Image: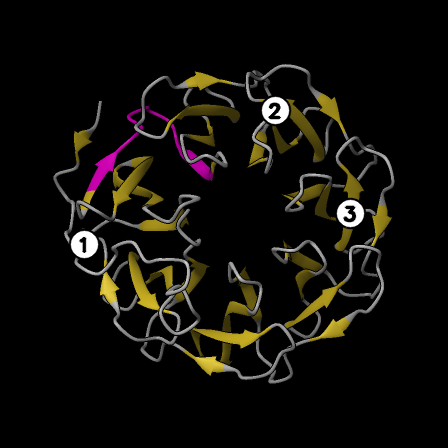
């Protein structure tokens, strides 16, 4: 049962659009910003227009995540002391609190049908994975370890969850089914493997790893076979993201702060950004034509878009204060 959050902030402008209307110019982007003195959730159109403040309270609201059909936004907030999960429902312009534990609840990811949410929580003293219905009911523990399990990612088929576990002394990639059973370890080395991201068809997982004395991008089959290193520079590379068709992987290189793309076979590595600064927090549009990202190339940390070839760069925000974590709204089903 939902419980109304007393700090809810009502907005207009998050209504459903048809798929034909969801073009670059009208697609909404959710993000968080410190422009008004503390960290809040905002919405804007894909061209930077129609800026809307979603939350308004003196605490920190962060890490917004669209539901798969774009009708809800989950986010975390420390407005009651610890980090809890909240949900904003677009159609009724209302925010609800989903978790009420004594620990911190982080790393939100939605099931493909939008009916469930997986997350990490230390409510029992250790960092483990939990799942719940999208209304906050039926919260249940999926893993039970004394070392951290984190970064859960629901598979596109809805039958598995990939995550990072430190149960072996360093971060490794594991998968479990949605009941927390049939656990399989996919990676096995002495360095940390982090940031797992499923391919759109669920056949592969891309991740970052520090195994070659710097952070590189790797891809592995969902059954743990066929592991391949995709980036081989002396830089650290992070933040891998798939294109919707699974043909490209985008990532951020720390050495020059630029965004690159590469095929899942490791071929056709291309640098997309050329303007300097740190370019990160990547989000690919549902049609695969645009990338939203954060850059400090103009001194302040702002949100930009570009096409997948790195052209047609557009600055969407231009105010003092940190803007982070842009995410394109999915096409409604």
Q: Categorize mark 1 by other alpha carbons within 10 Å: few (<14), some (14-19), many (20+).
A: some
User: Per the image, is 113 magenta?
Assistant: no
**Mark seen at residue 56:** 1
Magenta part of the chain: 95-109
Q: Secondary structure at mark 2?
A: loop
Q: Categorize mark 3 by other alpha carbons within 10 Å: few (<14), some (14-19), many (20+).
A: many
Left or right: 158 with respect to 303? right
Q: Residue at x 44, y 61 (%)?
A: 326
Q: Position of residue 291 (x, y in %)?
A: 54, 68
Q: Nearer the viewer, mark 1 or mark 3?
A: 3
> Residue 171 appears in which quarter of the rendering?
top right
Left or right: 103 with respect to 86? right
Q: Residue at x 44, y 37 (%)?
A: 106
Q: Is residue 151 above or below residue 296?
A: above
Q: How many marks?
A: 3
- Pointers 3 and 2 in contact (CB under 8 A)? no
Residue bearing mark 2: 147
* Mark 3 and mark 2: Cα distance apart in space: 25 Å
Q: Categorize mark 2 by other alpha carbons within 10 Å: few (<14), some (14-19), many (20+).
A: some
Q: Residue at x 56, y 69 (%)?
A: 289
Q: Nearer the viewer, mark 1 or mark 2?
A: 1
**Mark seen at residue 219:** 3
- Pointers 1 and 3 in contact (CB under 8 A)? no
Q: Secondary structure at mark 1?
A: loop
Q: Is residue 176 above or below residue 249?
A: above
């Amino acid at each position: 049962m939902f419980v109304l959050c007393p700090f809810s902030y009502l907005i207009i402008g998050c209504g459903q659009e048809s798929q034909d209307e969801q073009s670059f110019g009208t697609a909404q982007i959710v993000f968080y910003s410190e422009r008004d003195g503390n960290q809040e959730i905002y919405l804007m159109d894909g061209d930077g227009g129609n800026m809307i403040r979603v939350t308004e309270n003196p605490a920190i609201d962060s890490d917004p995540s669209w539901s798969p059909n774009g009708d809800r936004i989950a986010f975390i907030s420390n407005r009651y002391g610890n980090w809890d999960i909240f949900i904003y429902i677009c159609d009724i312009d209302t925010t609800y609190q989903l978790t009420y534990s004594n620990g911190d609840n982080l790393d939100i990811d939605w099931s493909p049908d939008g009916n469930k949410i997986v997350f990490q929580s230390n409510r029992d003293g250790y960092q483990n994975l939990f799942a719940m219905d999208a209304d906050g009911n039926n919260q249940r523990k999926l893993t039970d370890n004394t070392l951290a399990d984190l970064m859960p990612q629901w598979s596109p088929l809805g039958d598995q969850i990939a995550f990072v576990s430190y149960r072996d002394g360093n971060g490794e990639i594991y998968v479990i089914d949605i009941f927390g059973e049939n656990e399989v370890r996919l990676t096995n080395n002495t360095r940390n493997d982090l940031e797992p991201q499923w391919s759109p068809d669920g056949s592969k997982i891309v991740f970052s790893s520090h195994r070659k004395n710097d952070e590189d991008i790797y891809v592995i089959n969902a059954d743990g076979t066929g592991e391949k290193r995709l980036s081989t520079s002396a830089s650290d590379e992070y933040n891998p993201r798939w294109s919707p068709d699974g043909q490209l992987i985008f990532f951020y290189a720390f050495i020059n702060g630029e965004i690159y793309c590469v095929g899942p076979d490791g071929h056709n590595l291309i640098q997309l950004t050329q303007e300097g600064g740190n370019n990160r927090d990547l989000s690919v549009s549902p049609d695969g034509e645009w990338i939203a990202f954060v850059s400090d190339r103009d001194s302040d940390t702002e949100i930009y878009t570009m096409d997948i070839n790195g052209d047609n760069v557009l600055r969407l925000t231009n105010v003092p204060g940190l803007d982070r974590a842009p995410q394109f709204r999915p096409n409604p089903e």
